[in-house]
Amino acid sequence: MVCIVIGARKLGVNPDNIATPIAASLGDLITLSILAFISSFFYKYKDSRFLTPVVCIGFMALTPVWVLIAKQNPPIMKILKFGWFPIILAMVISSFGGLILNKTISKEQYKGMAIFTPIICGVGGNLVAIQTSRISTYLHMWSTPGVLPLWMKKFWPNPCSTFCTSEINSMSARVLLFLVIPGHLIFFYVIYLVEGPSVPNSKIFVAFYLLAGLIQVTILLYLAEVMTRLTWHQSLDPDSHCIPYLTGVGDLLGTGLLALCFLISWLLRSEAELDGISELASGPS
């Protein structure tokens, strides 16, 4: 991430636009890769009685070393003191999305939901993280922590001012919102090419899926505007405190709306099938 930010600055590109989504994508990829490798290693030595306790004790013993290293840098020490609560709360919020997925994934009417969940959650999380970073950078440039600019004094701005004005943050919110439908259509097409008939591809499902993505990102972009103002007013860094919350809410919203899409699509399909059977039964013998 350090290399990406420095490289973006040297190329004259705003790091807010590329660093945050790359961080999220690399975070998922690296986490899953490391998890797969380490779980395979532990499974291979599952009969060893001492391996797991030794590893846990080793990590606990190293914790004070990392704290001492962090203390050498005051900004990092501030994150060490106050940055844990947003991350833990965001994990709790995301866990509710996991519960929804766990309850629905094994049912026939939600077949294919596991494929779309990372997409809808990832798109929403990345877009809102970009917007939050941009607003945070804007506040760092034009104000001081604890003091909101005059044109951002309202904690709960009118949604129209968030999306429909000529102000720079409103313009970026519109651009990000306009990326939702083309982005989801591209991902949907790629998934359909890879997975084939196992993916629901009716026009009704696609329409509800795109509507769900649009609703999710609209809510998240508005919450980003509200939360950055509240955290900045409290002299807190929005990058550290808002992005975890918003990505967690994005996971919950995305999973919930996606489950609703599958359910509505299944209900409409079942109703159409019942109507077809009724017509056949009532037809001439």
Image (cartoon, rainbow, N blue to C red):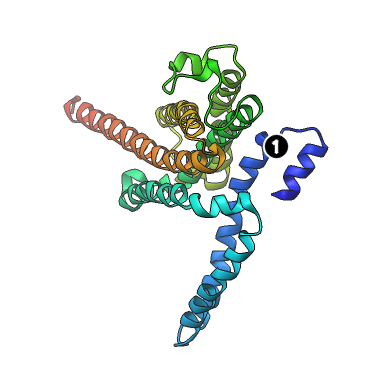
Q: Residue at x 48, y 41 (%)?
A: 247
Q: Is residue 218 above or below residue 31?
A: above
Residue 283 in which image quadrant: top left
Q: Residue at x 60, y 11 (%)?
A: 166
Q: Nearer the viewer, residue 60 or 271?
A: 60
Residue 250 in which image quadrant: top left
Label 1 belongs to which residue?
15
Categorize mark 1 by other alpha carbons within 10 Å: few (<14), some (14-19), many (20+): some
Which x, y percent locates residue 126?
56, 38
Examine the rendering and report whether any part of residue 112 can be seen. no
Q: Nearer the viewer, residue 91 or 124?
A: 91
Q: Nearer the viewer, residue 147 or 168?
A: 147
Q: Nearer the viewer, residue 17 or 185?
A: 17
Which x, y percent locates residue 210?
47, 28
Of the residues shown, which amino acid type is indicated by label 1?
Pro
Q: Is residue 237 above or below residue 131?
A: below
Q: Residue furthest right?
A: 10
Which x, y percent locates residue 211?
43, 26
Which x, y percent locates residue 8?
76, 39
State the quadrant of the C terminus: top left
Q: Secondary structure at mark 1?
A: helix
- Mark count: 1
Examine the rendering and report whether any part of residue 122 can be seen. yes
